Image: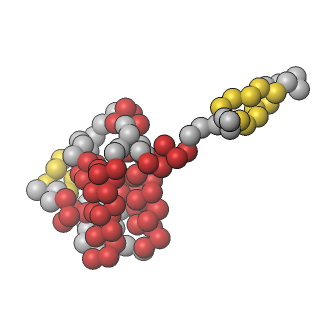
Amino acid sequence: MRELFHTATGAGRTRLRPARRRAHARQNPSVRALIGRGAARLARAGVYFGHGTDNAWDEAAAIVLHALGLPQHGDARLYRRRVGRDAGRRVRALLARRIAERIPAAYLTGVAWFAGVPLK
Protein backbone atom coordinates (compact mmCIF):
# COMPACT_ATOMS: atom_id res chain seq x y z
CA MET A 1 0.00 0.00 0.00
CA ARG A 2 1.31 3.45 -0.88
CA GLU A 3 1.79 6.04 1.86
CA LEU A 4 -0.25 9.17 1.44
CA PHE A 5 -0.31 12.57 3.05
CA HIS A 6 -3.00 15.20 2.93
CA THR A 7 -2.59 18.66 1.49
CA ALA A 8 -5.34 21.23 1.97
CA THR A 9 -6.18 22.84 -1.35
CA GLY A 10 -8.55 25.59 -0.27
CA ALA A 11 -12.35 25.67 0.06
CA GLY A 12 -12.19 22.75 2.47
CA ARG A 13 -11.11 20.29 -0.20
CA THR A 14 -8.34 17.84 0.49
CA ARG A 15 -6.08 16.30 -2.13
CA LEU A 16 -4.15 13.05 -1.68
CA ARG A 17 -0.62 12.73 -3.06
CA PRO A 18 2.00 9.97 -2.75
CA ALA A 19 4.48 10.63 0.06
CA ARG A 20 8.05 11.32 -0.94
CA ARG A 21 10.42 8.43 -0.78
CA ARG A 22 12.85 9.49 1.90
CA ALA A 23 14.79 6.22 1.93
CA HIS A 24 15.97 6.95 -1.62
CA ALA A 25 17.06 10.44 -0.60
CA ARG A 26 19.12 8.99 2.25
CA GLN A 27 20.75 6.37 0.04
CA ASN A 28 21.44 8.74 -2.85
CA PRO A 29 21.54 12.25 -1.40
CA SER A 30 22.03 15.33 -3.51
CA VAL A 31 25.27 17.30 -3.48
CA ARG A 32 23.42 20.06 -1.62
CA ALA A 33 22.26 17.59 1.05
CA LEU A 34 25.80 16.30 1.56
CA ILE A 35 27.07 19.86 1.95
CA GLY A 36 24.34 20.61 4.48
CA ARG A 37 25.08 17.47 6.50
CA GLY A 38 28.79 18.17 6.34
CA ALA A 39 28.29 21.75 7.51
CA ALA A 40 26.22 20.52 10.45
CA ARG A 41 28.91 17.99 11.39
CA LEU A 42 31.66 20.62 11.18
CA ALA A 43 29.68 23.09 13.28
CA ARG A 44 28.92 20.46 15.94
CA ALA A 45 32.59 19.47 16.04
CA GLY A 46 33.63 23.07 16.66
CA VAL A 47 36.44 23.07 14.09
CA TYR A 48 38.24 26.33 13.34
CA PHE A 49 37.68 28.05 10.01
CA GLY A 50 40.11 30.53 8.53
CA HIS A 51 42.28 28.75 5.98
CA GLY A 52 40.38 29.80 2.89
CA THR A 53 36.87 29.62 4.37
CA ASP A 54 35.25 31.32 7.32
CA ASN A 55 32.16 29.20 7.93
CA ALA A 56 30.97 25.59 8.09
CA TRP A 57 28.93 25.71 4.84
CA ASP A 58 31.84 26.91 2.66
CA GLU A 59 34.24 24.46 4.30
CA ALA A 60 31.83 21.57 3.76
CA ALA A 61 31.24 22.64 0.15
CA ALA A 62 34.99 22.68 -0.54
CA ILE A 63 35.37 19.18 0.93
CA VAL A 64 32.29 17.68 -0.73
CA LEU A 65 32.99 19.10 -4.18
CA HIS A 66 36.64 18.02 -3.99
CA ALA A 67 35.75 14.50 -2.87
CA LEU A 68 33.27 14.20 -5.74
CA GLY A 69 35.65 15.66 -8.32
CA LEU A 70 33.22 18.47 -9.13
CA PRO A 71 34.05 22.11 -9.92
CA GLN A 72 33.92 24.60 -7.06
CA HIS A 73 31.68 26.92 -9.04
CA GLY A 74 28.62 25.33 -10.59
CA ASP A 75 25.03 26.06 -11.38
CA ALA A 76 21.91 24.81 -9.57
CA ARG A 77 21.98 21.50 -11.48
CA LEU A 78 25.29 20.63 -9.84
CA TYR A 79 23.74 20.89 -6.36
CA ARG A 80 20.69 18.80 -7.33
CA ARG A 81 22.86 15.99 -8.67
CA ARG A 82 22.43 12.68 -6.82
CA VAL A 83 25.47 11.01 -5.30
CA GLY A 84 26.08 7.26 -5.21
CA ARG A 85 27.18 5.22 -2.22
CA ASP A 86 30.89 5.07 -3.03
CA ALA A 87 31.08 8.81 -3.61
CA GLY A 88 29.15 9.40 -0.39
CA ARG A 89 31.69 7.27 1.48
CA ARG A 90 34.55 9.36 0.07
CA VAL A 91 32.83 12.52 1.27
CA ARG A 92 32.17 11.11 4.76
CA ALA A 93 35.75 9.88 5.06
CA LEU A 94 37.20 13.27 4.14
CA LEU A 95 34.82 15.06 6.54
CA ALA A 96 35.71 12.60 9.30
CA ARG A 97 39.40 13.29 8.73
CA ARG A 98 38.78 17.05 8.80
CA ILE A 99 37.03 16.69 12.15
CA ALA A 100 39.26 14.08 13.81
CA GLU A 101 42.63 15.47 12.73
CA ARG A 102 41.58 19.16 12.58
CA ILE A 103 43.28 19.54 9.21
CA PRO A 104 41.82 22.51 7.27
CA ALA A 105 40.04 21.75 4.00
CA ALA A 106 42.69 23.69 2.08
CA TYR A 107 45.31 21.21 3.27
CA LEU A 108 43.11 18.17 2.63
CA THR A 109 42.19 19.26 -0.89
CA GLY A 110 45.51 20.88 -1.81
CA VAL A 111 43.84 24.12 -2.87
CA ALA A 112 42.61 27.30 -1.20
CA TRP A 113 40.39 29.83 -2.93
CA PHE A 114 40.89 33.57 -2.76
CA ALA A 115 38.64 35.98 -4.69
CA GLY A 116 37.59 33.14 -7.00
CA VAL A 117 41.17 32.17 -7.79
CA PRO A 118 42.52 28.74 -6.79
CA LEU A 119 45.82 28.85 -4.90
CA LYS A 120 47.73 25.56 -5.01
Q: Is residue 75 above or below residue 64?
A: above
The residue positioned 48% from the left and 43% from the top of the image is: 24
Q: Residue furthest left?
A: 120
**Relative to the observer, which residue lies in front, 52 or 1?**
1
The C terminus is located in which quarter? bottom left
Q: Residue furthest right?
A: 12
Residue 61, position in %: x, y? Answer: 34, 52
Residue 54, position in %: x, y? Answer: 35, 62
- Classify residue 103 as left or right of residue 1: left
Q: Quadrant of residue 74?
A: top left
**Relative to the observer, which residue lies in front, 114 or 85?**
85
Residue 106, position in %: x, y? Answer: 21, 62
The residue positioned 39% from the left and 33% from the top of the image is: 76
Q: Residue furthest bottom?
A: 101
**Relative to the observer, which residue lies in front, 42 or 115?**
42
Q: Quadrant of residue 99?
A: bottom left
The residue positioned 26% from the left and 68% from the top of the image is: 104
**Relative to the observer, which residue lies in front, 88 or 61?**
88
Task: Tell me if I can see residue 64 in this picture.
Answer: no
Residue 22, position in %: x, y? Answer: 55, 45
- Classify residue 99 as left or right of residue 27: left
The residue positioned 45% from the left and 57% from the top of the image is: 37
Q: Is residue 35 above or below residue 73?
A: below
- Classify residue 98 as left or right of residue 40: left
Task: Tell me if I can see residue 25 in this picture.
Answer: yes
Q: Quadrant of residue 52?
A: bottom left
Q: Is residue 64 above or below residue 83?
A: below
The N terminus is located in which quarter? top right
- Classify residue 96 as left or right of residue 37: left
Q: Coloring scheme of the render?
A: secondary structure
Q: How many marks can you see?
A: 0
